[in-house]
């Protein structure tokens, strides 16, 4: 069996060095990289595809919880082990067998316990997938509903406010997201993006288009009961509305 690939994420270099040293004492693990903030963690997860991410919680503008939310939205998702100096009630939520955490300063015996748990999970693929899902379920209630999403540009992750998204289009087996910052890529399907944005002001107006309704500036009637939407105050930026979605669009945009 191949060794578990590990990414270490912490904004303090001494903590990364210490954890790397303790993990390297265990065969069956390979440290594939380190990151010093949440945004770099997302980027390196995409690039390195680790099996496990040891994630500090308290970090800069993108916390460990927020980075984990973005990481777990991608497939395949790694397992997250949280590392923190704060032994609060929130940490108790992770003591459920499949999801783990380690406290700072790191103790050799506690790290060894975590490694043993990871190896047991690795031996049973179904248990591994269940563990990933449990992390998703546990961190979701603790996260503020951050209205940002990580999109890709030239191999890097760019954090974009939902309000900056104009529309997304599925084409050539990829999803291009047109934003106020320019075109970016979403690393998934249009349906997956729709699921993440549907609770906000976004609507799937066509099988190939997802639109931010707040960016709609005009509606153009077209042939056979269909419509086009103009966006972002630009006559050159238009998306089609399928006939089956016309009624919904008119209702949401308060068109008689």
Image (cartoon, rainbow, N blue to C red):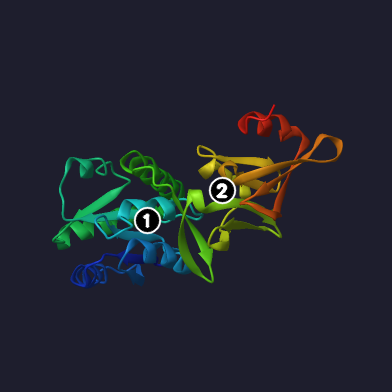
Query: Mark 1: few, some, or many residues within 10 Å (few <14, many ≥20)?
Result: many
Quarter of the image containing the N terminus?
Answer: bottom left
- In this rendering, would 114 be left or right of 156? left
Residue at the disc numbered 2: 193
User: Residue 176, how many percent across, how many down?
Assistant: 62, 58
Residue at left offset 68%, top offset 31%:
250
Tell me the tag on residue 148. none
Q: Quadrant of residue 205?
A: top right
State how far apart marks 2 and 1 are (Cα).
17 Å
**Relative to 68, is 250 above or below?**
above
Please name the residue that numbered disc 1 is placed on: 67
At horizontal 64% and vertical 45% (from top left) the residue drawn is 217
Q: Is residue 121 visible?
A: yes
Q: Nearer the viewer, residue 31 or 12?
A: 12
* Secondary element at tag 2: helix
User: Is residue 131 positioned above or below 84 on the image?
Assistant: above
Q: Within the image, what quadrant is residue 57 found in?
A: bottom left
Given residues 189 and 122, the one toward you in this image is 189
The C terminus sits in image quarter: top right
Q: Can residue 5 be seen in the rendering of this structure?
A: no
Quick one: 118 or 171, which is closer to the camera? 171
């Amino acid at each position: 069996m191949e060794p578990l690939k590990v990414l270490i994420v912490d904004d303090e270099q001494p903590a990364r060095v210490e954890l790397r040293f303790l993990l390297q004492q265990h065969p069956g693990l390979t440290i594939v990289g380190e990151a010093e903030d949440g945004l770099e963690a997302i980027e390196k997860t995409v690039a390195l595809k680790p099996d496990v991410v040891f994630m500090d919680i308290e970090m800069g503008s993108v916390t460990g919880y927020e980075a984990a939310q973005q990481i777990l939205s991608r497939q395949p998702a790694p397992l997250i082990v949280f590392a923190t100096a704060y032994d609060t009630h929130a940490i108790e939520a992770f003591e459920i067998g499949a999801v783990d955490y380690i406290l700072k300063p790191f103790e050799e015996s506690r790290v060894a316990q975590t490694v043993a748990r990871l190896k047991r999970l690795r031996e049973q693929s179904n248990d591994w997938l269940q563990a990933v899902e449990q992390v998703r379920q546990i961190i979701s209630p603790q996260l503020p509903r951050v209205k940002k999403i990580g999109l890709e540009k030239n191999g890097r992750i760019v954090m974009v406010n939902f309000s900056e998204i104009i529309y997304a289009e599925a084409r050539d087996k990829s999803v291009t997201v047109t934003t106020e910052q320019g075109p970016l890529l979403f690393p998934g399907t249009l349906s997956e993006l729709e699921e993440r944005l549907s609770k906000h002001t976004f609507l799937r107006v066509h099988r190939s288009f997802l639109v931010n309704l707040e960016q709609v500036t005009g509606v153009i009637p077209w042939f056979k009961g269909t419509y086009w939407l103009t966006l972002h105050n630009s006559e050159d930026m238009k998306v089609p509305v399928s006939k089956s979605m016309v009624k919904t669009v008119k209702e949401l945009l308060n068109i008689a």
